[in-house]
Image (spheres, rainbow, N blue to C red):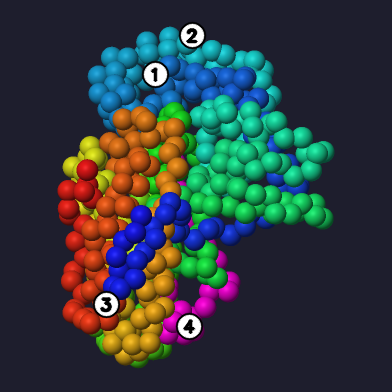
Amino acid sequence: MHLALGLAPIVATPGCWCPDPPNGEHALEELVERRDLIQQGARMREAGCRELAGSSSGGSSGLGELPEFGGAGGLGGSEGFGGADGFAGGDGFGGATSWGGATGLGGAEGSPGMDDPSAVPEVCGETFPDWVQTDYPYWHEENITRALSWDPSSGCPTTVQYDALMQTLEYTYAEAIELLSSADGVCVYKRVQYCPGGRPFLVEGQARVAALRRKGGRARPGDPIREALAAAFSADALAEHASIAAFARLSLQLMAHGAPLDLIVRSQRASLDEARHAALCLREARRHAGTKLDWAPLPLEDARLTVTEEELLITNVLEGCIGETLAAAHARARAAGARSQRLQKELLRLAEDEERHATLAFGILRWQLERSPALRATALATFREFQPPVRQPTPAEADARWQAAGLLRAADMSAIDWAVWHSAIVPLAARLLHEDASPRASPVRTRSRDCTS
């Protein structure tokens, strides 16, 4: 497909523009530990540990297995603490369906209950380290099978086995595509990663993000779809969190190159926008995961502040002109499908923020081209090398809850990418890069019907 940009065509072919994550590098001992933990979880599933824990600490109507602590059947709900069937109610403390009653703690439906701890299998007393983010009852059977199919005595796991070892225990969309090295007991994999959009924090050409840590407690009982939703919003949260650093660094780089104060102020404001976006996505990740997630440190090793004019231009085109424009369009489409009116409003505000960020990026590009016209060739080449992403579908997106939660299917994201590339990014870039004219960059808008259908 050829798209005209200035006087030269862009050859747009399927691919993925988002920088790859760092290589996955793990000692065999670490991977064996992961396999052992997955095997432990599989044994706990087989023993029914969660069901036993739920029935022995509250029975079938007990506190431990309620979908919402404080919901309809929870603490303070219609059947909860102080309610009709709650503490001191008709079926309350000491009543028919409560503590010590027919269906309560240690009762008939709470078997074996706390009165018979010897009946609980020993494996049910095992725990997981804090860095494990997912909840074992809701691991995908296919991933468990793949992970446990790896025989450590055979050396490094295959890419498929490696992905299962990583994705079963943590929220991640990174996928291994090649085993690069297996020397000295260390397995090194080349990886690609689902890219939520926005301005990535690039370090040596790779998107750098922090990690999320689970802060105590187990996840709320759910299902694989809820796990997938938690993983998707975790990826979004990490990307938005990294964008705070990306804009903070951009502000310093603009200052180092003598940029107008207006551009620096807008960059600083954008960094604060991204903090709000990160908080929104983390809230949704926590809600779907049913447990408290918090930020781990963002590694800053090798993150450069000093860049040349050419490096600043290339990064700004990829991160801002392209990345922020696509992110804005995605956010508008996500808002259209979200069931919650609150989330709709928040995603629309996020889209407006990303549109301002994209407009800022085109403003930075214009300033650079006006100051150094020779950079036009570099800008043109950067746009020409862009390839709209190939979005890989996930099984969870077939569920109606996926879009209702404010997420997009892979096919819809790809359609938006191509529509926005053709209708917004190329025309705006052409206006700036055309040899015979350089009018002021217009505000980026992604409200066209093609971008939200």
Q: Nearer the viewer, residue 222 or 327?
A: 327
Write down the region rendered in magenta.
291-316
Q: Nearer the viewer, mark 2 or mark 3?
A: 3
Residue for badge 2: 108
SS state under label 4: loop
Q: Which mark is residue 307?
A: 4
Q: Earlier in the sequence, mark 1 or mark 4?
A: 1
Does the residue at mark 3 contact the one at mark 4 (Cβ under 8 Å)?
A: no
Q: Nearer the viewer, mark 1 or mark 2?
A: 1
Q: Earlier in the sequence, mark 2 or mark 4?
A: 2
* Residue type at numbered disc 4: Val
User: Is residue 130 among what the camera can see?
Assistant: no
* Residue 251 part of the magenta-drawn span: no
- Mark 3 vs mark 4, CA separation in Å: 26 Å
Residue 149's image quarter? top right
SS state under label 1: loop
Residue for badge 3: 434
Residue 139's image quarter? top right
| Residue ID at (74%, 54%) | 181
Q: Nearer the viewer, residue 415 or 135?
A: 415
Q: Nearer the viewer, mark 3 or mark 4?
A: 3
- Mark 2 vs mark 3, CA separation in Å: 79 Å
| Residue ID at (38%, 83%) | 375
* Residue 292 part of the magenta-drawn span: yes
Q: Nearer the viewer, mark 3 or mark 1?
A: 3
Task: Tell me if residue 275 comes above or below residue 70 in the rendering.
Answer: below
Q: Residues within 10 Å of mark 2 (few under 14, many from 20)?
A: some
- Mark 3 vs mark 1, CA separation in Å: 69 Å
